[in-house]
Image (cartoon, helix red, strand yellow):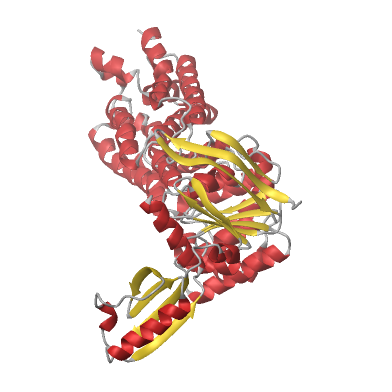
Amino acid sequence: MEDSIIEVRDFRKVYGDFVAVDGITFEVNRGEIFGLLGPNGAGKTSTMESLEGLRLIDGGELRVAGVDPGHQPHLLKRVLGVQLQSSGLPANIRVDESMRLFCAYHGLPPRDDLLDRLGLNEKRSAQYHQLSAGQQRRLALALAVAHKPPVIFLDEPTAGLDVASRVQLHDLMRELQADGTTILLATHDMAEAAELATRVAILLRGKIATIGTPLELTAAGAGLTKISVRTEGSSLARPEAKFPGIQQTSRQEEYFIYFTTDVGGTVSALMAYLHAQSDQLVDLRVERPSLEDRFLEITHHGAAQ
Amino acid sequence: MNAFAQHLAFQFRTGIRDRSLLLMNYLFPLGFYLLMGALMGQVNPGFLGSLIPAMAVLAVMSGTLLALPGTLVEAREAGIFRSYKVNGVPALSILVIPVLTTMVHSLIVAILVGVSAPSLFHAAVPTSWAGFLLVFLAMSFAFAGIAGLIGVVSSNNQMTVLLSQLIFLPSMVLGGLMLPTSMLPTGLGKVALLLPTTYAMNAFGELAMGQTMPVNSVLSLAILVASGALAFYLAVYLFRWDSKNAARRAHPALALLALLPYIAGLVLIR
């Protein structure tokens, strides 16, 4: 039996008549990076904020490292570090002041090593509002992990960051995981979730639509293969461009995207069609659907229902 | 340094670093003091007898009523309280720390006024600085409690301005800052008894300036302290970590209970 550190059982959150979370159950094991995915309004934030002790729950049971977030706030702060989506810091607090202040509330000396590690050493005298978006997020992460909690919640940690900052934060997350820290990661970035998460749960309308490793999720789709095609002409836009096995079609810039159950049949028919239309093939890619494709399939299917 | 002291030190520096707080804590009360000292001293020399306490009251009102509620609302809306909560900062600290630092800023202004007014404007010097400090602390406590309560119950900054001005403007006109409350018509004199400024000026007059005042200074102090304590209790009780979580302990109208000490004053003082 795996060692679960976050437990969510029959959790329910209601706002007036709106059921934001409808009795979900999942566990996160110690040392996992667990991705919480879902479209806006799916219940991610309600789940995260209830686990952070920021919202009262309307049913079920939550535990973070054995602590009830709603009723044991003083124990929760010891076991949980939170990087909130919004800034959460006064505009004129200095970087070194914020580290001193937050560490003091945890009864610890300031973790200047984290400022060095996250490239904030030169900015330690800068006020929060003078930092770039990437620096603000790095500081928020430094403060969240400063007291070495066993569990960390990250809400869109890399949203709006440049590539270098993203890579830096991803490296830190992997280091934390290697040290045994459990990370609950809420993100809209499917590539990030696929790259970092050991398991993900996709929430849809307050329920868990699916849960598993990124590989399991992509494999457990409708068994579709993604074929991306780009041609010189526009023959694929014509109504007669129909091929066997196609379940779903979309366009992405100059590419026609086909999801098929019959790769061989589709590609053969496609090549024959292009030859007949005298249209030149520029690029053709056959891929396993990504986590993003699977996410879109699930949310599209859910929306259709 | 422990967490409370760290937080207090940061909040104190904020009162100088933040331009709007610097304006309300220092620039506005000191500028107003210089203007009033120069103008009112010429127009009404009797005003110089109460210049120092009047400007101390103004400094406290400016730092508390005009600055503190907006700071609290902005911090709540920016998610700063949420961040504090997940890091274990108690609600009491969030309210008490800005109040304490505002009191210190106001005290610095009061000292600057107290030291400079006699030489600059020939203002009357307090006969008892201990009495001055006692009244200053009671008055600061009362205004800070009210300002904290306004910040807690206001849903946005416009609301804080409205509620603060409901106290600030009548206090300036009727509270004994510009002219003694004994000169007010009977009806307005009764209205003045609903304002903390009236009790502060009465207590300053008797305990700090050695003057005979219409309201007993012990009663004035009692009303100020009771008001501060009640407003603080209500502010902590009605405190919300964020505006997203709909759960409230009680309706914000409960804050009106903070008027009780002043209503008692209105009943007791004839």
Q: Is residue A232 visible?
A: no
Front-lying residue, B52 or B267: B267
Q: Nearer the viewer, residue A15 or B80?
A: A15
Place of residue B46 in the rendered image (x, y in percent of width and height, measured from the top left): 30, 28
Q: Nearer the viewer, residue A173 or A270?
A: A270
Count of numbered marks: 0
> Is residue B18 shown above or below A221?
above
Residue A249 image point, x, y percent: 35, 70
**Depth check, front residue: A133 or A6:** A6
**Is residue B217 found left or right of A276 in the rendered image?**
right
Looking at the image, residue B195 lies above or below residue A198: above
Q: Is residue B79 visible?
A: yes
Which residue is the extreme one toward the right? A1
Residue A69, x across and y down, in percent: 62, 40
Query: Looking at the image, which residue is at 54% across and 48% down?
Result: A48
User: Is B94 placed above or below A124 here?
Assistant: above
Q: Reply above or below: A287 against A89.
A: below
Q: Residue visible at 28% across and 32% down?
A: B169
Q: Quadrant of residue A71?
A: top right
> Residue B85 location in percent, x, y?
56, 43
Residue at screen point 52% across, 33% down:
A58
